[in-house]
Image (spheres, grey):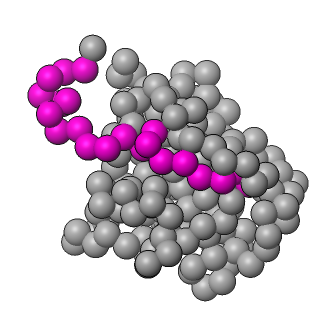
Amino acid sequence: MIDPCYAARMTKPVYEFSAKTIAGQDASLELYRGKVLLIVNTASQCGYTPQYKGLEALYKKYKEQGLEVLGFPCNQFGGQEPGGEAEIAKFCEVSFGVTFPLFAKIDVNGAGAHPLFKHLEAEAPGILGSKSIKWNFTKFLVDRHGQVRKRFGPRDAPAEIAPEIEAELAKK
């Protein structure tokens, strides 16, 4: 049961969005209803790319408790994701053993930004209220009701945000 005070503050849940998977299939985020989500814009040639390893570690550790990590490759920051979907998928699997869901390359800022990321940015602004994403590996924590709870910057290593993920997972 959702607390009535919390329900009054709820906005559009992320489940209302869809995106193409890295394999090119349409996927509704409704598939993740009831899960805690960590939604991340990623890149294969970034100084933060080693975070894939930490994201995969979080996924493996907390998947059975209800965590899903969703990776969205983006080439808007320094051209650090130049490859196509097949190349990205292979790189992530071979280099970091990524098994969490990856989606097709998208824009996260500007007029062509994916609607999901427009929503995430509006619900969890960055420093000084900035809505745009500043760099690769910005992370958004979403609760089991599809509500955006918090934004983490690229410098926030996956292991550092584990306590906040655990807190969300503890809520039913």
Give the number of callouts.
Answer: 0
* Residue depicted at 63% across the width and 43% down the height: 27
Name the image quarter holding the C terminus.
top left
Q: Between residues 69 and 23, which one lies in front from this camera angle?
A: 23
Q: Is 69 placed left or right of 111 in the picture?
A: right
Q: Between residues 108 and 53, which one lies in front from this camera angle?
A: 108
Q: Whole-percent x and y of residue 49?
A: 67, 65
Res. 15 visible in picture: yes
Q: Whole-percent x and y of residue 58?
A: 60, 39
Q: Whole-percent x and y of residue 67?
A: 54, 32
Name the image quarter holding the N terminus.
top left
Give the vertical position of 102 relative to 127 (above or below): above
Q: Is 145 placed left or right of 88 in the picture?
A: left
* Residue depicted at 66% across the width and 83% down the height: 79
* Residue depicted at 50% across the width and 75% down the height: 112
> Where are the magenta residues, as a range?
2-22
User: Which residue sits furthest bottom?
Assistant: 78
